[in-house]
Amino acid sequence: MVALDVMEKSASIEVLQAELNDFLGVVIKIEGELESVATAVEAGRRVARQMGGRPTVDVLASPESQAREAIESPAEYNPLIQQAVVTLPAEEVGTDMGQAEEALGFIETQGFTAVFDAVDTACKAAQVEVVGKEKLGGGYVTVVIRGDVAAVTAAVDAGKVRAAQLGTLIAAHVIPRPSRSVLSLLPQ
């Protein structure tokens, strides 16, 4: 989500979908003018690397129409992990997010105990709302919270300390004024 936010804020792109893969990651599919897509992908790659990720990126110039049949997937829900594995952007995005004072916070851990305690600590530290949680496989779990920038920052700071004490903190990040694409892919 952090990479997608940076991508959309760096160039004019449109998100097609997000798809979980079996290698503890998410494939974010975007489209737009070739130069815009290349700029956005490079910005996303940079921020993902800064956060310790090892992104694989590619830009397909004028994808063949038949190839799109394999590239674009229908929405898919996996009942085993109880969440979507292919997420299409929501048609309408709530108007109460994206304002200057609004933010999203992410705390990602390896292990449920650490993430549950981290989100409880985060909610006790500041006035925030839990948006949802995503399971990425391999025990990786991300919890998403929202609220004003100061509250989300305080909550994420408190939550990441607690997560690191109990398990493996993978990442913690605050996105002020999240982009429309990020808002459209939030857990429902």
Image (cartoon, rainbow, N blue to C red):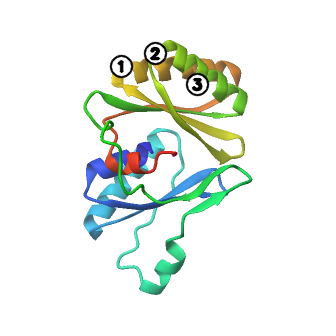
User: What x and y, as percent, mark residue 37?
Assistant: 32, 63
Residue annotated with mark 3: 119
**Neighbour class for label 3 at 10 Å: few (<14), some, many (≥20)?**
many
Q: Cα distance, mark 1 to mark 2?
A: 9 Å
Q: Are marks 3 and 2 in contact (CB under 8 Å)?
A: no
Q: Where residue 150 is drawn, which disc sits there?
A: 1
Q: Do the residues labelled 1 and 2 touch (CB within 8 Å)?
A: yes
Task: Please report the residue visible at 54 percent of the width from the left and 33 percent of the height from the top.
Answer: 171
Q: Are marks 1 and 3 in contact (CB under 8 Å)?
A: no
Q: Where residue 183 is drawn, which disc sits there?
A: none
Dot 1 amino acid type: Ala
Q: Which of marks 1 and 2 is nearer the N terminus?
A: 2
Dot 2 amino acid type: Ala
Q: Which of marks 3 and 2 is nearer the N terminus?
A: 3
Q: In the rendered view, would you say 8 is above or below 115?
A: below
Task: Please report the residue visible at 53 percent of the width from the left and 20 percent of the height from the top.
Answer: 122
Q: In the rendered view, would you say 130 is above or below 136?
A: above
Q: Where residue 126 is drawn, which disc sits there?
A: 2
- Say whether residue 19 is visible: no
Image quarter for residue 22? bottom right
Dot 3 amino acid type: Val
Of badges 1 and 2, the one in the foreground is 2
Please tell me whether mark 3 sits on a helix, a strand or a loop.
helix
In front: 138, or 131?
A: 131
Q: In the rendered view, would you say 163 is above or below 87?
A: above
**Neighbour class for label 2 at 10 Å: few (<14), some, many (≥20)?**
some
